[in-house]
Amino acid sequence: MDNAGIKLSTGIQSEAKVLCRPTQLAQILINLFNNSFDAIRDSKGAWLKIETKQRDSFVDIYITDSGTGIPPAIADKIMQPFYTTKEPGKGTGLGLSISKGLIESMHGELKYIETSPNTQFRVSIPAYRAAPHLHKNNAEFV
């Protein structure tokens, strides 16, 4: 698939069900996609890949783009509210901090993977089989 010159690919490894609030998980993923798009849209050969992998009691969703990563001095700040690298009027600096709070409310984690040669984030969400005790928080299985 190709969109705005960005090649999109998927690598779905697991059909595992996760315990989450689907609308909030979608908001997290859309924020990560938008950030990737903003960062690579003017790059030649730009690509975005979405992968899932089962890891212990979590399902990991990896969002990787063709960027070369985030400098360490910036990476330490990206999850802070109101921190943005975008030019004025293009972003509020709230997307990643809100996404981090949302995933943590679902007992998951949002992490920038600094060891990747490209720009990569991992959204880890409890797998259904590993989280039956969490069912009471208005979460759903997807």
Image: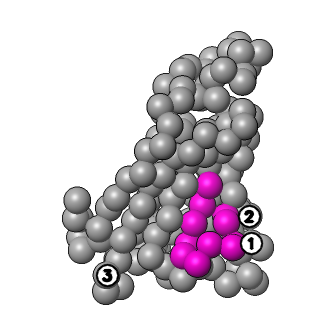
Tell me the distance, in whole angstroms, between the alpha carbons under discs 1 and 2.
5 Å
Front in this rendered view, residue 11 or 68: 11
Mark 1 neighbour density, 10 Å: few (under 14) some (14–19) many (20 or more): few
User: Which is closer to the viewer, label 1 or label 3?
Assistant: 3
For the N terminus, the quadrant is: bottom left
Q: Which residue is at 42% across, 51% downward?
A: 11
- On the image, numbered disc 3 is attached to which residue? 45
| Tag of residue 80 | 2
Please state which amino acid type lies under the numbered disc 1: Lys
Assess whether residue 19 is covered by the magenta stretch: no
The residue depicted at 69 percent of the width and 73 percent of the height is 115
Specify whether 43 is left or right of 19: left
Residue 77's tag is 1
Residue 7 horizontal/vertical position (percent): 29, 68
Question: Could you say which is closer to the camera, residue 92 or residue 66?
Answer: 66
Cα distance between the residues tagged 1 and 3: 28 Å
